[in-house]
Image (cartoon, rainbow, N blue to C red):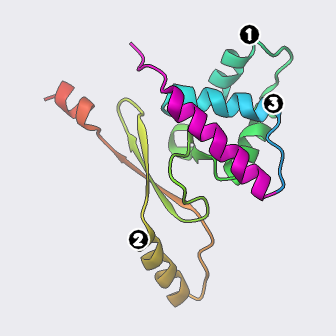
């Protein structure tokens, strides 16, 4: 059984998105809002084609290209993270938006958690500078086993 949708989490996620888009003079179109709402309601990683399926009930002629453009916008705004290792998207719950980020992904159930760590970001920035580069932004994906899966498999 899927966990209940946290209406406060969805509402605060949408309010944050509206604020960020307003600050950056970008539009949170109805489709972008719908996609972000779906991601916030799922409370975990979601694949693009699952979003298409979910939204196809209310939006006809929704193509993969449209969804991917929408997701790219949300990623660019720092509202959503792309998890390349499982080809999914996760709504952002931290207010880091321009820093490095750790994404922890359970290799069994595919549950994902994000962690913002300014101290780690600072260490990475220092190391990049030693290499003659500047770290602008990025994420590090780490695979492991979540506590729930570890308990199931003793």
**11 or 124: which is nearer to us?**
11
Magenta segment includes 116:
no
Judging by the rendered image, the residue that carries numbered circle 1 is 57
Tell me where residue 11 appears, x and y as whole percent.
Answer: 59, 33
Viewer-side label of 2, 3:
3
**115 or 5: which is nearer to us?**
5
Judging by the rendered image, the residue that carries numbered circle 2 is 120
Residue at the spot 54% in from the left edge and 56% down from the top edge: 95
Q: CA distance from mark 3 to mark 1?
A: 15 Å
Q: CA distance from mark 2 to mark 3?
A: 36 Å
Q: Is residue 100 above or below residue 153?
A: below
| Image quadrant occupied by the N terminus | top left
Main secondary structure along the magenta-highlighted residues: helix
Secondary structure category for the residue under label 2 = helix
Q: CA distance from mark 1 to mark 2?
A: 43 Å
Tell me where residue 41 appears, x and y as whole percent.
Answer: 55, 26
Residue 70 visible within the image = yes
Tell me where residue 146 appears, x and y as whole percent.
Answer: 29, 38
Tell me where residue 49 appears, x and y as whole percent.
Answer: 67, 24
Judging by the rendered image, the residue that carries numbered circle 3 is 30
Residue at the spot 60% in from the left edge and 58% down from the top edge: 97
Q: Is residue 129 left or right of residue 150?
A: right
Which segment is the magenta one?
A: 1-24
**76 or 5: which is nearer to us?**
5
Secondary structure category for the residue under label 1 = loop
């Amino acid at each position: 059984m899927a966990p209940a949708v946290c209406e406060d989490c969805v509402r605060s996620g949408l309010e944050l998105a509206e604020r960020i888009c307003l600050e950056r003079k970008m539009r949170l179109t109805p489709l972008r809002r719908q996609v972000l709402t779906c991601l916030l309601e799922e409370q975990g990683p979601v694949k693009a084609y699952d979003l298409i399926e979910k939204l196809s009930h209310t939006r006809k002629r929704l193509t993969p290209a449209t969804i991917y453009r929408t997701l790219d916008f949300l990623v660019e705004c720092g509202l959503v993270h792309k998890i390349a290792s499982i080809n999914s998207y996760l709504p952002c719950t931290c207010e880091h938006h321009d820093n490095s980020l750790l994404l922890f992904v359970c290799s069994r159930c595919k549950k994902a958690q994000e962690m913002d760590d300014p101290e780690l970001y600072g260490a990475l920035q220092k190391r990049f500078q030693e290499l003659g580069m500047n770290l602008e932004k990025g994420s590090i994906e780490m695979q492991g086993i979540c506590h729930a899966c570890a308990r199931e498999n003793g």
